[in-house]
Amino acid sequence: MKRDKRKRYLCFVLAAATTMSLCTGAGASSLDELQQSIQDLQRAQEELNQDLNNSESVKNSLQDYLQEANEQVENQEQKKQETEQKIQELDDQIGAIAGELSALEAQTAQKQQEIEKLKESLATANERLGQQYEAMKARIRYMYEHGNDAYISVLFSAGSAADMLSKLEYIAQMSRYDREKLQEYQDAVDLISASTEKLSQDEAILNALTAQVEEKKAAAETLLAQKNQELALQEQNLQASQSLAQQYEQQIEYQDNLIAQLEGAQAANLSQQDEAIAALTRAIAEAEEAQKAAAEQAAAQAVLQKLAQIEQDVQASLNGDGSYNIVVDPNTLFVWPCPSSTRITSEYGWRVHPIYGDNRFHSGIDIGADFGSPIIAAYQGTVISAGYNTSMGNYVMIDHGEGLVTIYMHASYLCVSEGQTVTTGQLIALVGSTGDSTGNHLHFSTRLNGNYVSPWNYVQTGN
């Protein structure tokens, strides 16, 4: 809005400056330069406005893109939370697998220890079995070679019955010993067989445990790889979205800086326009003032010349006592205040005001007359006021005594001053159009005891 007003004002000033006929010579050249400077500044301002609009449009687009990128970042962060929850579940699974794996490894280690001990026991049993086997071979060989003769020779070697019984007990103990050794051997063989079978079973269990451990490890590694892949992908997507948002933010910051520079250039340009307009306005005002002064001087000279001519004419028609050369009706004391005209342009009473257009009371009568026509005192009296008023223009008030006052308004020139005594028909002013006036005329009012009354009570056009 301010820019539009400024443009209209610039166009008005430029048009006014262009149409001034007084701008000639160096003055016109200076005004042309100022106009050209303002036009250049206007064109620069339009370009700045276009650049600023473009930058703001780009910024708005970038802000839309930034909003989308931020939404992507939010989505990625939400997905990251979902991924973290999923990873937590994977970690829980990996932890459970790790617990199972730890238990399996503990079982495997225990089973390995049991197998090692079993192998040691089996080796010891095999060694003892070998020794028993060698002893039994030697005993069997001895029994085979000597048979029952050995027992008989033992009995025959007894020296008494008691010795015989002792020998028999010895033979019985030897038999029990042989049977026990045989049983021990058999037990050792059974133990070795059972231990061998248990070792085979334990090794199978160990192999199964080892396979389970490897399976659990592979499952844990698979979950861990899946976790790392999820994390890497999510982090990559999040970084990409954040990087994109950061790029938009940097571009928006660049546009903000550019907009600030353009606005600064606009402000500087507008300041220069203001200075140029002020200079052009001053130049126009000076030119108008010069024109007005020249016109007023010419008008004043013309008025003075006309007044001089009127004064000569008036002086020629004046009587020796200074009164205007008129005939006074002996039946009345008052004379017509404007000898050159009896044309009434506005009557006394209510009317539509010619300037303000509202309904107002007209306190006198308007007598249309040429500029510089004589205005005379309608009756003798004392001038109680002579001066200028914005509404009445140049005016004269004459007190005639007994509360009666006559008033003469809108004069171009006053011939009397306050306190001066005047006679009936004496020249007091010249017709004009000063104050609130639409043309040359005399406004004549009569006031009795402070109140306006109709002038027709005192004057007549035929006087």
Image (tube, rainbow, N blue to C red):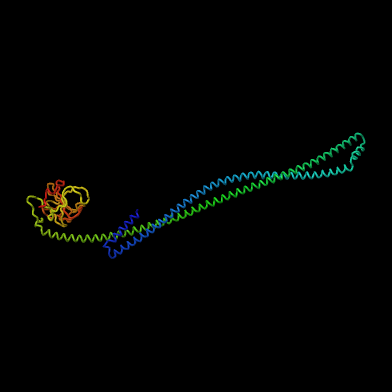
**Above or below: residue 216 compared with residue 294:** above
Name which residue lies at 53% across and 51% down: 237
Q: Is residue 18 visible?
A: yes
In this view, the residue in front, 193 or 393, is: 193
> On the picture, is 397 further left or further right than 136?
left
Picture quadrant of residue 103? top right
How many marks do you count on the picture? Answer: 0
Residue 386 x %, y %: 17, 53
* Residue 6 locus on image (x, y percent): 33, 56
Q: Position of residue 261 (x, y in %)?
A: 41, 57
Tell me, yes or no, if residue 407 can be seen here.
no
What residue occupies the far top of the structure in this picture?
A: 161
**Residue situated in front as seen by the camera: 360 or 278:** 360
In the rendered structure, the answer to whether residue 377 lies left or right of residue 238 reads left
Extreme residue toward the left, this view: 330
Residue 64: x %, y % from top left: 45, 52
Up the image or down, 388 lies above or below 169; here it is below
